[in-house]
Amino acid sequence: MSRVLIIGCGGVAQVAIRKCCQIPEVFSEICIASRTKEKCDKLKEALEGKTETKITTAQVDADDVSQVIDLIQDYQPDLVMNIALPYQDLTIMDACLACGVNYMDTANYEPEDTEDPQWRAIYEKRCKEKGFSAYFDYSWQWDYQDRFEKAGLTALLGCGFDPGVTQAYCAHAKKHHFDEIDTIDILDCNGGDHGYAFATNFNPEVNLREVSAPGSYMENGKWVEIPAMSIKREYNFDQVGQKDMYLLHHEEIESLQVNIPEAKRIRFFMTFGQSYLDHMRCLENVGMLRTDPVLFEGKEIVPIKFLKELLPDPASLGPRTHGKTNIGCIFTGRKDGQEKSYYIYNICDHQEAYKEVESQAISYTTGVPAMCGALMLLSGQWNQTGVHTVEEFDPDPFLDALDKYGLPRSENFSPVLVD
């Protein structure tokens, strides 16, 4: 029996909360906290009478460390699940350290204001030293390693699907299928159709910043950076079909290179339709993806925040999204001296996800792993102190939990490789 504070009440958080409520013997009490308490209250009302989990709600500005500290001290949770925005990772980690409570999130830190001079100086230094220019990287959170370790606390980073499950797939491949891994290709395919001309399947700010950034991959221990969307491949995904996919920078590449250092190449691909790409390029060309304030009619606005208000809320896409996702990892390497390839992946149906938790599959495939990661921490199956990513823990109980709670694995022992 545990008390869990869940910060965030967007699409992903709502899936994680609903899944937590399916296991009241572990998640006996949860507090849902968000800047907009009304959203929390609405979800609580929808769940009451359907779960034995005791639900309370609270208002919190997660940008304010003191507010988060006050909330933690008042609620006294065993774990804080940060399913808010990645901009708030560091403030919530600071609060957890101050209060002596374990922490987890679903995506690594990135700044809200990429023009902040203090952040910019550190960022530009990192670009020169490491060779990639994405705004998000693990260095800010890895810097908390000694503090969490000395406090006897665990911080679990990036426990969604990608990052998260994809890293567990890598740990599983290393533990059970390979003596040495040569290449890792992470493939993220969304074959769903929501019927809109343009919409993002998760937070528009984060999504559009991610996919419009230069792509990069790891090869022979070094980052190779390329113009955005300049490497395209086609792949025939199980139960989805032939799709165009593009090489992106993604955070798990950075941690996998540290934890599976023998890998000679690590890449990440995501599928996009032509309509999505045309809209995104147009918005970028006219400045709508800018993250710095501009003056409009005497007031400062941030273009990408204004755009977010115009686009459909990702949490609203569930009823109208049909099709499936297919996300997984393809490996090459050796086992017992023999060359080997292996593909492990999950297929998730948008409408089946909606029937269960009133969400489309993108939020489902992130929210379920968040719950399963919390389950690992609360049950003591993952108990290494310090700051860690998913592949640093035993993948077996985590993947077993995913199989049980909605994201079962599939395997292919002779997959088509990506050239």
Image (cartoon, rainbow, N blue to C red):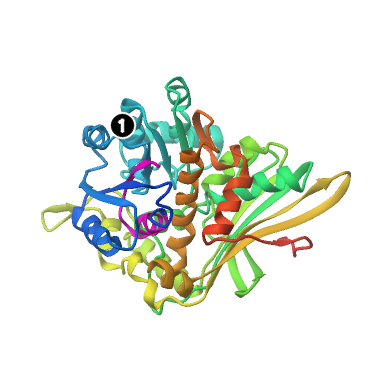
The reply to whether the magenta stretch includes residue 2 is yes
Q: Nearer the viewer, residue 411 or 182?
A: 411
Q: Quadrant of the C terminus?
A: bottom right
Q: Is residue 418 toward the left or the right of residue 224 in the image?
A: right
Q: Nearer the viewer, residue 2 or 240?
A: 2
Q: Dot 1 corresponds to which residue?
A: 95
Q: Nearer the viewer, residue 218 or 300?
A: 218
> In x, y percent, where is residue 328?
62, 58
Q: Is residue 80 toward the left or the right of residue 182 in the image?
A: left
Q: Name the residue at 27% across, 35% down.
A: 72
Q: Quadrant of residue 201?
A: bottom left
- Magenta residue span: 1-19
Q: Name the residue at 31% across, 43% down.
A: 113
> In x, y percent, where is residue 167?
59, 47
Q: Residue furthest right?
A: 337
Q: Looking at the picture, does residue 233 appear above or below residue 36?
A: below
Q: Residues within 10 Å of mark 1 (few under 14, many from 20)?
A: many
Q: Is residue 188 toward the left or the right of residue 33 in the image?
A: right
The residue under label 1 is which amino acid type?
Answer: Ala
Is any part of residue 86 visible from this angle? Answer: yes
Q: Looking at the picture, does residue 395 appear above or below residue 404?
A: above
| Element type at mark 1 | helix
> In x, y percent, where is residue 132?
53, 42
